[in-house]
Each structure stands twice: as C-alpha cells, then as structure tokens.
C-alpha cells in the first residue's frame, strides 16, 4: 500500500492506496504536525497496513520536512516529494518552481483520467483553477479567495454579521441575516466560478471543456452547475498516487 499526504493550509489529506486506487482516507489539522497530534492520528490510521511507499505534496513549507521525517522514521519508507521537476506532466509556465505542488498533483490526475484540454477547480482555503492545454501541459491558472475565507472575512470585519456554516440556501431571497449571507456566498460563488470557466473556454478554444471539481466544497458548488462535468473529491491524492507510480517505473 502507498501512503499519500496532501498538506494544505488548513488540513492534511491522507490516503492509503493500492493498485486499484485509494481505499481509505482521513483529514487531520495541518497545525497538528508541529504538536505531534497529527503523527499520532496517522499512526492509528495506518497501523494495520503494510506501507511500501509514500508520496507528499505540500503548500506549507514549514510542515513539509515534518511530514517527510515522519514518513521515513515512523513508516520506514522513502518519501517521494512532488515538485515541478518530479511531476510527470508537461509544464509551460515561466517559473515552474512557483507552482503549488497540490496544483501539479491535480494536473497529473486530470491528464491521466480525462482528455485534455481540461480544467481543475480545487475548492480549498483558496479556490484554484488549474489549466491543462490540448497538449496535456500545465499552462497556468487562476486563484481566488476560498468560500470560508470570504465568509469568515465578513464575520471578522463587521460587527453584526455572524460566522456561517456553509450550506445551500433554500431560496434566492434571504429572509434573515444568515440566509442573506448564504445566498451571497453560495450563489455568488457559483457566479464567480461560472464566469471564470466561460473565459477559460474562450482562451482554450474548447467547448465543451472537461471541468473537474475537487476539494471541500466541490460537491456543494457543483450541484447546480452544469459547467462542472465531474466531481472528484480525492483528485489531488489520485495525482500523487499516479506521480509516485511513475517515479517508481524509472
């Protein structure tokens, strides 16, 4: 089995994969790597599994060596770290080293699982759009504030607006403050995503265009958006699994 670690700003997504794909997965708070709490949870998660390899992508540089050390010392296997140099995907980008490794993992997965050109929309702390051209090369993308970032900002910067638990609003006209905020957040966010997808279709000269959603709010936002053609919650981990397999065939 292969242990997969996708270190995000808020959570670390961890998967266990075999030849048939990802069999189990959990999320742990990324801050837990510094306290040791994350390592304890991962040991429990993996305790009955025979781990033969591991792959890591991280957007938190301070945590990357902590996870790599855990893999090598606690699991006893070499840790493959996904970078622009090690990613099995074409890259047409001025400074490849500045591309987020999670975005590279998404690009790896979408080029293998879908037919380029294609776009990945990853709903994390930020929402990112990763663009793969018809040659199967990563060519860039778009970054916007994540849904929680937007709603938390409203709560933190205003005296009367509450912190939200995000859900689909029942109607488009809010009858109280929470409903009104939900309409602005969810429908407004769908509008943001829809407009960016429309512009990307023009730029790529591709219609229809495969658009794959992943990340925490992927299912919620995609539910009423025909522009999103597939939802793959574990796409980033799948990209890591594919990249690890490619590195071990060399």
Image (cartoon, helix red, strand yellow):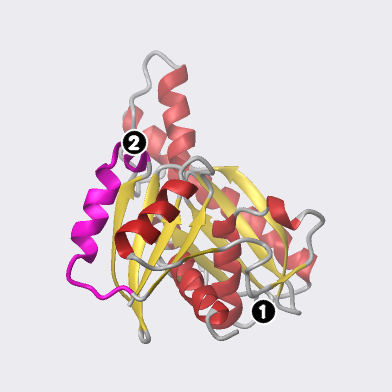
Vertical placement of 35 versus 197: above or below? above
Is 146 inside the magenta-drawn segment? no
Residue 229's spot in the image, x, y percent? 52, 73
Residue, disc 2: 179
Q: Residue at x 59, y 72 (%)?
A: 108
Q: Position of residue 249 (x, y in %)?
A: 55, 86
Residue 83 seen in the figure: yes
The answer to whether residue 143 is above or below residue 237 is above
Callout count: 2
The question of residue 44 being in magenta is answered with yes
* Secondary structure mainly formed by the magenta segment: helix
Residue annotated with mark 1: 116
Q: Which segment is the magenta one?
A: 31-51
SS at badge 2: helix
For residue 135, side relative to residue 114 (left or right) = right
Question: Where residue 149 sits in the image (x, y, percent)?
Answer: 47, 36
Camera-side mark, 1 or 2: 1
Q: Nearer the viewer, residue 242 or 47?
A: 47
Location of residue 147 in the rendering, given as x and y in whole percent from the top left corner = 46, 42
Picture quadrant where residue 237 is located: bottom left
Q: Earlier in the sequence, mark 1 or mark 2?
A: 1
Residue shown at the point (38%, 44%) measured from the top left: 30
- Disc 1 packing (10 Å; few <14; some 14–19; many ≥20): some
The C terminus - image quarter: bottom right
Image quadrant in which you'd find residue 121: bottom right
Looking at the image, which residue sits at the far top? 159
Disc 1 is placed on an element classified as loop
Image-based side of 39 in relation to 232, left or right = left
Question: Is 225 situated above or below 89?
Answer: above
* Residue that appears at 54% across and 43% down: 61
Q: Quadrant of the N terminus?
A: bottom left
């Amino acid at each position: 089995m292969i242990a997969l670690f996708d270190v995000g700003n808020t959570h670390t997504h961890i998967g266990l994969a075999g030849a048939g794909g990802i069999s189990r997965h959990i999320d742990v708070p990324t801050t837990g790597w510094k306290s040791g709490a994350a390592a304890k949870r991962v040991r429990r998660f993996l305790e009955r599994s025979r781990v033969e390899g591991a792959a890591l992508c991280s957007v938190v540089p301070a945590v990357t060596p902590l996870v790599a050390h855990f893999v090598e010392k606690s699991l006893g296997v070499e840790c493959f770290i996904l970078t622009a140099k090690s990613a099995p995907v074409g890259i047409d980008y001025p400074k490849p080293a500045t591309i987020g490794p999670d975005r590279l993992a998404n690009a790896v997965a979408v080029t293998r699982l879908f037919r380029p050109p294609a776009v990945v929309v990853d709903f994390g702390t930020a929402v990112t759009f990763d663009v793969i051209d018809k040659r199967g090369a990563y060519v860039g993308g778009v970054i916007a504030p994540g849904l929680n970032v937007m709603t938390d900002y409203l709560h933190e910067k205003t005296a009367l607006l509450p912190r939200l638990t995000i859900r689909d609003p029942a109607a488009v006209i809010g009858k109280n403050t929470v409903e009104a905020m939900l309409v602005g957040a969810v429908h407004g966010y769908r509008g943001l995503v829809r407009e960016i997808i429309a512009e990307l279709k023009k730029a790529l000269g591709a219609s229809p265009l495969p658009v794959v959603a992943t990340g925490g709010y992927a299912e919620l936002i995609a539910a009423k958006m025909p522009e999103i053609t597939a939802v793959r919650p574990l796409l980033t981990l799948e990209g890591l699994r594919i990249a690890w397999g490619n590195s071990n065939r060399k």
